[in-house]
Amino acid sequence: MDLDRLDRAILACLQQDARLSNQELADKVGLSPSPCWRRVKRLEEAGIIREYVALLSAPAIGTPILAYAQVSLNDHHPDSTAKFDAFVQASPHILECCAVSGQYDYLLKITCASMEAYELYLSQQLLRQTDVRSVNTSFVLNQKKATTALPLSNASDETSDQPQ
């Protein structure tokens, strides 16, 4: 689906504040409410807008530890990867999981309440997965940037992202 200037403006506004009313959104992008609502519905139906969520502060809710774990499996048999994928889906501590190229098979973004809680999670859950060969963890010391907003530029706009 090709996105025009108004679609991009709607998406940018919703990425910044998904709680905007349709009237507020329409005012921000220069549309009347009905066409704005139709565009949002079309973006939802096309799967461009997947869901609306509340983003929480991890330290405020008691999970200040953020770690990235590089995981290697014993093999790449479909049963092994399916079993590991099921574990990942069931684990609330795993915020993101990517199958990656390179030395490791997976990169996990994990949150915990403390270093002790992470060690317990690692030893009692992650390393008990029979298909896991190794885990190498890096802990976040200071998060310099965190966003869920995706860039909305055209391919021709890509050069405008470069510093002058």
Image (cartoon, rainbow, N blue to C red):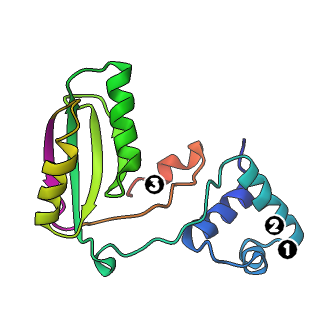
Q: Position of residue 16 (x, y in %)?
A: 55, 71
Give yes or no for residue 136 being in the magenta stretch: yes
Q: Earlier in the sequence, mark 3 or mark 2?
A: 2
Residue lying at 19% horizontally and 68% vertically, measured from the top left: 142
164 shown above or below 108:
below
- Element under label 1? helix
Q: Position of residue 74 (x, y in %)?
A: 20, 24
Bin the neighbour count of mark 1 within 10 Å (Cα to Cα): few under 14, some 14-19, many 20 and up.
some
In front of the other: 47 or 1: 47
- Element under label 2? helix
Residue 75 vs residue 78: left or right? Answer: left
Screen quadrant of the N terminus = top right
Judging by the rendered image, the residue that carries numbered circle 3 is 161
Q: Position of residue 80 (x, y in %)?
A: 32, 25
Residue lying at 33% horizontally and 35% vertically, measured from the top left: 84
Give yes or no for residue 133 being in the magenta stretch: no
